[in-house]
Amino acid sequence: MITETFSSGTRTLRYTRQGAGPPIILIHGLSGSGRWWRFNAPALAASHEVLTLELLGGVGVQEAARLIGAWMEQLDLPPCAVLGHSMGGQIALYVAAASPQRVSRLILACASGLLHAAWWKVALNLPRAGFSGRPRFMPVVLRDSLRTGLPNLYRSARDLLRDDVEALLPTIQVPTLVIWGSRDPLVPPHLGQLLAQRLPNARYTEIAHAGHVVMVDQPAAFNRAVIGFLAQPLAGET
């Protein structure tokens, strides 16, 4: 698996590619990294080409979406499924709205976007949200948070909370899976249900015994739901 980088302006992303088949892009959340998909990427790569992104520095939501759009254009990718977690889901909404011809499906995992809270409340909840059912994953959370740095965390958290996706949602027509952890303490499940209701072509599924990092807490159930959604034919396919 080869790691490559892409830069546009002053911003850079890092990405890996593995597997073969229809492409799926994985976008991590606030203070995350490609390591957050360690229990999911291999399963997805059995039937898809998996492009795992790492956004470097304290990049804002819309800024990250523009960077990813430029990267997709540079690689001339065919229509991709886009899977975003938390802030990555909020970014994915903008990618789909700006480049509908390049996005075939959306998967929004515990996505921010409808979360309206003071940034310091979100910051206080981050450690609890990051503590998953897998204690061995906690060092990854801590390392990634330290790598991101407090100033970048503050800027990104403030940006995602100020960003309002409400007007964007009715414009996104691609088939969308909204997937949530039933015990998410950071972005409560009722916001996932509301998100699915406001997207024209979305369905909601909830994973039991999972928190905010749903793909780590219950990876088998998460992978089944995502792979099942990806296997469903799109309109016009047989």
Image (tube, rainbow, N blue to C red):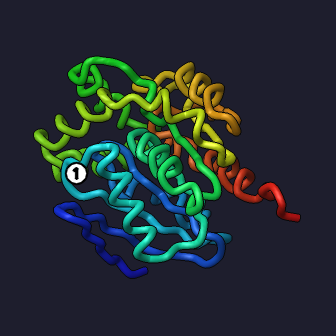
Q: Quadrant of residue 145?
A: top left
Q: Is residue 216 above or below residue 3?
A: above
The percent position of residue 37, horizontal first and vertical second, equals: 46, 56
The percent position of residue 96, horizontal first and vertical second, equals: 53, 50
Q: Assign a secondary structure to mark 1.
A: helix
Tag 1 residue = 143
Residue at the location (33% across, 77% down)?
A: 4
Q: Is residue 61 left or right of residue 106?
A: left
**67, 3: nearer the viewer:** 67
Q: Residues within 10 Å of mark 1 (few under 14, many from 20)?
A: some
Q: Is residue 37 left or right of residue 219?
A: left
Kindly tell me whether residue 208 is visible in this rendering: no
Q: Amino acid at mark 1?
A: Arg
Q: Quadrant of residue 178?
A: top right
Residue at the location (18% across, 37% down)?
A: 155
The percent position of residue 28, horizontal first and vertical second, equals: 39, 51
Residue at the location (68% across, 37% down)?
A: 202
The percent position of residue 212, horizontal first and vertical second, equals: 45, 34
Q: Quadrant of residue 112?
A: top left
| Residue most extreme to the right | 238
| Residue most extreme to the left | 151
Residue at the location (58% across, 39% down)?
A: 171
Kindly tell me whether residue 177 is visible in this rendering: yes
- The C terminus lies in quadrant: bottom right
Q: Is residue 178 left or right of residue 215?
A: right
